Image (spheres, grey):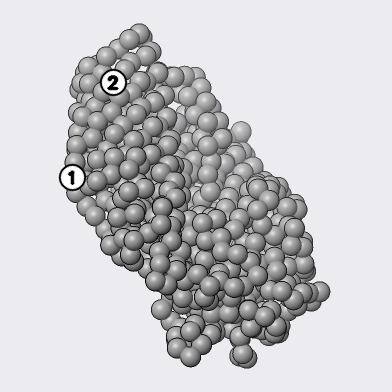
Amino acid sequence: MKKSAFHLGTLSAALILAHGSAHATNGLFMPGFGYRAIGMGGVGIAYGRDSLSVAANPANIVNTGMRGDMGAAIFNAERHACTGSATGLLTYVPAAGSYPQSQFGFDGCSESNNKYYVMPEMGMTMPLTEQLHVGIAFVPLGGGGTSYPYNFFSYAGTTPRTPTHEEKLGVDLMILQAPITVGYKINEHHAVAASLSLAASRFRAYGLQAFQKFDKSVTAITSDPAHLTNNGFDYAYGAGVKLGYLGEFLDDRLTMGVVYNSRTYMTKFDKYRGLFAEQGDFDLPESYGIGLSIKPMKNLVIAADVLRVKYSGVAAMSNRGPGTYTGTPINNTTGDGPIEAIPSHGSTTTGTPKELGNDQGMGFGFKDQTVYKLGIQYGVNQRLQVRAGYNYGKNPIPDDQLTFATLAPANTEKHYSLGFTYKASEELEITGAYMYVPSNPQQSPLKQNVVGAATIDMHQNIFGVSLGWVLDPGPTEYGDAPMEALDLTGIYMGFGIGQAQVNNWTKYAADFVNSSFGTPSPVSADKRSLGFKVFGGYQVNKYFGVEGGFVDFNDVKASSTVTGPARSVYTTAENDAWTLAAVGALPVSKRVSVFAKLGASSWSSNLRSVTTQLGAIANTAAASKRNRGVDLFYGLGASYALLDNVDLRGEVERYKFDNLDIDLMTAGLAVKF
């Protein structure tokens, strides 16, 4: 067990250092804590058996025993937003030659880059006596963000700010929580617990220069333009308190849990005190909930939670942002006129309380949210548990608050999940979970202030795996039927991150623009992007194996102009592939091997071009095309055995996509079972 503990500590440190932004699914927050909970729709107030469950209810600690858990998930978030005339909601006025409701030429559609994120988690719990239990966990609490390659918040044509559509637009928020927990078992059926919840947040915003000053007059919507955007990452730290109760009734067939999470008071984001209300304050809201779990039979658990999140207590989240206006849109050519209805109950100009960053400054307009969770777990036999769950939280973003919501479209509502736990040995449990979050398209009313109209959309996939090292188990709900241990020798899983290069992207983009809009000027192209892949395989022997996986090459972009009339053109291509390959390996030493692979990829390439007429306001057009196919790919690489069951891998691969040749260079980890 000492060896396992060493592995846990080493890998946990590496995973925490690699923590990326978590894109929450219940408003700002994750749907659950631990991949056991995710597999059951996120439930955890009345039922939790691993060390991560203390983040849902600290009183769960009395049922976890002595154990350590470590896991990671691949979080896939597909986010899309449109503003102004590009939404298709506005009316074109021929006499004006524009869409008058689009006040500033903020017109365009963009799909966010950086669609994949690694989310690690870890925790450990232990009893000090039969009544007293302690533990600590590190969990992704939530966050959100986007990285739009096309900046639809950029002035166009004759407005004071020159077009900068090629400048990326986005925000990036990550929140990590570390509850330090003490639990006390009052008697056989009742327990209470408390956690000191330490928290750390990281944030940045970029591409929002247009909001520093809207026009040629003194009109503004920020109290501190220098601290609104493009200031790099800023960090905030804070703490709150969690209180929990668990009670068992009806011969332990019914469990009730209650939890209260205080507001987490954070230090301020000083670099963005001109963006968030109260001079950069971004505390985490108070929440409270109740849960029930029922055990109709020894190996069957049905659990349900209801959680209330009080966004209204945090000004940066709940203060209304730009709403709808009732008057005539601002004349963005001369710079005359007010910015109306920001928020909807009044206008704002320089020096007024509603400016971004002030105590009453605009926010994201979140409403308080009630989240409902339902999960079921069945112990198939002595080694296997299977799970399913459903989670629903009404979208906290009102329809008239989409101007700022385009930056972080946290509007999903329904969640469906499946999961399992396999007991590989008396000391090791392997848990897996998958959650699907369907899209919930949302559109603003007409006369949405600043943009005229807006639409947002997002759907998500979460794939999570965790390992649990069990020294002294708590209660379990496995079945009674015996099952022989599975032989997992030779199976491995891993991931890699690196750089993709699309070698003939410039010509490919030019051909697409030519077929869609006319002959382009010389195309300026960025053929490099971030590449990411996940894979799994089976090593037949030390010389031969089979490997499959998924590769996301992210987006590459290109810009150009076309004539008749003169228009700027922004083109992106989103490329990904599913792969299957034979792998040949040659051991060089006890720890180092080189390998080569040859296989097939089922690829997809999505092209999209958006044009903006130069010298005009709100005159955009778009074209898109999706190609699919199957082609050969090949690669070379090397691996180093960092631990007995963990390899460092580096490799270079070449993929063929239609008329595109893509090189991918990655470094990553592979875990062997």
Q: CA distance from mark 1 to mark 2?
A: 23 Å
Q: Quadrant of residue 127?
A: top right
**As drawn, 164 above or below 203:** below
Residue 56 appears at what percent x and percent y? 54, 53
Pointer 2 residue: 595
Q: Nearer the viewer, residue 430 or 591?
A: 591
Q: Quadrant of residue 650?
A: top left
Callout 1: SS: strand
Query: Position of 498 compared to 588: left or right?
Result: right
Q: Nearer the viewer, residue 434 or 145?
A: 145
Callout 2: SS: strand
Q: Residue furthest top?
A: 589
Few, some or many C-alpha atoms within 10 Å of disc 2 (few <14, some 14-19, many ≥20)?
A: some
Tell me if residue 391 can be seen.
no
Few, some or many C-alpha atoms within 10 Å of disc 1 (few <14, some 14-19, many ≥20)?
A: some
Q: Going 69% across and 62% down the picture, which residue do you hit?
A: 275
Q: Which mark is residue 630?
A: 1
Q: Which mark is residue 448?
A: none
Residue 621 appears at what percent x and percent y? 39, 71
All told, the count of numbered labels is 2
Disc nearer the start of the sequence (1/2): 2
Residue 234 appears at what percent x and percent y? 68, 48
User: What amino acid type should be assigned to the residue bearing mark 1?
Assistant: Val
